[in-house]
Image: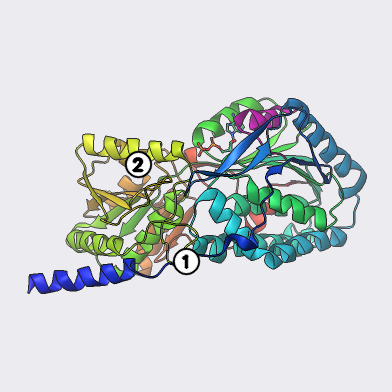
């Protein structure tokens, strides 16, 4: 009987993995061999005269090269943003500003396929995700904030709002276009101008967005997009003529930024790391919960600050949940990000793969038991099999530190109080998930879990109307919704 069952499962896995390849064609994506800096409405050669390459992490092939902005380039961009703010953007009637933001949203929709392909090529995420999540959600953020631009008096009733001025925005490599949209759309809707820097490993969709901004005829200097690494980011943070820093990235860099702006009158929102607890109670619909856990940790290769990277399962269903998880992991396809069958694409960079592999070793050395799915992975490129650890202690580094990869640490619990204590026992506080049949339990958990977002019987759900952000070392300030507008205005 047992043999028959395992044969059936094996057949199912094989058929899932043996699907004929369904690759998205690259032909719709136009990538130039070299990109300059987008300053004052034009693509300008960098004063640094330096460029660096950006590669496809699935093949390690170079896609293009982009400019490396130095201090003088940052000065140019900030100067353009300041002039556009003083002379054009803050004076423009809000309903006119809204039209530009709508136009950007519509143009992203029109070029959605190109954006999705380039996002997957440059960052390694599966095309299904960039096509169905990143790009449409980015367009939705522009639509949503375009709607608010001329209605700020309703967003902040009986109050007057003033824009802050020039916003310096620094974004990470996990959701490059979406993070650009999260940052640019509310800034423009509230009358600010922008200098944005994408991450060094994923600059291409932000530069494509610059092309759209140029085509949309946005007044020159309202949005400037400059490329570079940490030094360029630091030059933006330290520039005296910037009024607000919006940063999404690691907690370490978030701390550096906090120190750098202490004592200045720059405002900041920081969206940093996470180590979210996903909690399954014994009354939860287990298949649905397992699906949510899979999505919570393996979506975007686990390169998600709100990833559900710690799983707490009530003891009576622990074995069953772990078995179901392993079965489900076996069906996952790891490989070519452009293949529409792919569930887990490429790890974003060699450096990130090394970090993940370091944690896989640490987890085993700490005594946890590692299980990886048996799937094959491509020889070239940066890939990691979906991985879970059981026998994990609360103090283990794999349960405490953000890994930012497809790696889940699983523990059991008996009582509500115990799991609340364990879930909150982390320096982070970005998100959490609760799986239970009981509404009362959900409310009990959501009031006690110290996390900016708590999902109930679902995970990783995003909407432009909903604020997102963290507690503790996960940062402060909110993006999305009305809260996201508040982060870009002085309320008088
Ligand atoms: P990760 O560690 O996940 O790569 P980082 O926090 O290093 O994330 O990067 C997020 C963004 O912050 C990137 O755009 C990166 O270039 C930028 N960055 C890195 N170091 C600094 C710094 N010292 N000041 C400002 N920005 C920085």
Looking at the image, residue 192 sits to the left or right of residue 422; the answer is right
Looking at the image, residue 292 sits to the left or right of residue 78; the answer is left
Residues in magenta, as a range = 226-239
Vertical side of 313 occupied by 174: above or below? above
The location of residue 355, given as percent across then percent down, is 39, 36
Q: Nearer the viewer, residue 352 or 185?
A: 352
Q: Is residue 16 or residue 469 the one in the foreground?
A: 16
- Indicate which disc, 2 or 1, sits on the residue closer to the N terminus: 1
Residue 296 horizontal/vertical position (percent):
40, 57
Dot 1 falls on a residue whose secondary structure is loop
Residue at 83 percent across and 63 percent down: it is 99
Report the residue at 64% width, 53% height from top.
Answer: 182
For marks 2 and 1, give the CA distance. Answer: 39 Å
Name the residue carrying label 1. 340
Counting every numbered tag in the picture gives 2
Residue under pointer 2: 425
| Residue 368 vertical placement versus 109 (above, below) | above
Query: Is residue 69 located in the magenta-colored stretch of the structure?
Result: no
Q: Residues within 10 Å of mark 1 (few under 14, many from 20)?
A: some
């Amino acid at each position: 009987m047992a043999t028959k069952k395992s044969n059936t499962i094996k057949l199912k896995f094989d058929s899932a993995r043996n699907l004929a390849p369904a690759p998205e064609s690259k032909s719709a994506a136009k990538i130039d061999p070299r990109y300059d800096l987008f300053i004052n409405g034009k693509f300008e050669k960098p004063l640094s005269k330096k460029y660096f390459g950006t590669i496809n992490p699935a093949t390690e092939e170079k896609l293009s090269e982009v400019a490396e902005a130095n201090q003088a380039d940052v000065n140019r961009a900030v100067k353009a943003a300041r002039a556009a703010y003083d002379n054009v953007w803050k004076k423009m009637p809000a309903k006119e500003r809204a039209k530009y933001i709508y136009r950007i949203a519509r143009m992203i929709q029109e070029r959605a396929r190109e954006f999705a392909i380039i996002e997957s090529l440059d960052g390694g995420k599966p095309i299904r995700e960039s096509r169905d999540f990143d790009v449409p959600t980015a367009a939705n953020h522009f639509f949503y904030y375009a709607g608010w631009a001329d209605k700020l008096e309703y967003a902040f009733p009986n109050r007057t709002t003033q824009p802050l001025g020039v916003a310096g925005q620094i974004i990470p490599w996990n959701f490059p276009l979406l993070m650009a949209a999260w940052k640019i759309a509310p800034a423009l809707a509230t009358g600010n101008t922008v200098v944005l820097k994408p991450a060094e490993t994923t600059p291409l969709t932000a530069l494509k967005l610059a092309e759209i901004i140029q085509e949309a005829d946005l007044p020159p200097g309202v949005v400037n997009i400059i490329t570079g690494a940490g030094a360029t980011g630091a030059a933006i943070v330290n520039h005296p003529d910037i009024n607000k820093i919006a940063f999404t990235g690691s907690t370490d860099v978030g701390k550096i930024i906090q120190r750098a702006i202490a004592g200045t009158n720059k405002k900041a929102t920081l969206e940093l790391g996470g180590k979210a607890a996903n909690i399954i109670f014994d009354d939860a619909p287990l298949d649905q919960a397992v699906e949510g856990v899979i999505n919570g940790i393996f979506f975007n290769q686990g390169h998600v600050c709100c990833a559900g990277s710690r799983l707490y399962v009530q003891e009576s269903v622990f074995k069953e949940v772990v078995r179901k998880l392993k079965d489900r992991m076996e069906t996952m396809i790891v490989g070519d990000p452009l293949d529409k069958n792919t569930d887990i694409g490429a790890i974003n960079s060699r450096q990130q793969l090394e970090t993940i592999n370091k944690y896989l070793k640490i987890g085993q050395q700490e005594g946890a038991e590692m299980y990886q799915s048996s799937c094959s992975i491509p020889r070239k490129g940066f890939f990691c099999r979906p991985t879970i650890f059981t026998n994990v202690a609360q103090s283990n580094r794999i349960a405490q530190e953000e890994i930012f990869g497809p790696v889940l640490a699983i523990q059991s619990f008996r009582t509500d109080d115990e799991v609340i204590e364990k879930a909150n026992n982390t320096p982070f506080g970005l998100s959490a998930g609760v799986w239970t049949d009981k509404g009362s339990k959900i409310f009990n958990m959501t009031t006690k879990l110290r996390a900016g977002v708590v999902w109930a019987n679902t995970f990783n759900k995003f909407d432009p109307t909903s604020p997102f952000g963290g507690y503790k070392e996960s940062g402060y300030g909110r993006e999305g919704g009305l809260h996201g507008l508040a982060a870009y205005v002085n309320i008088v």
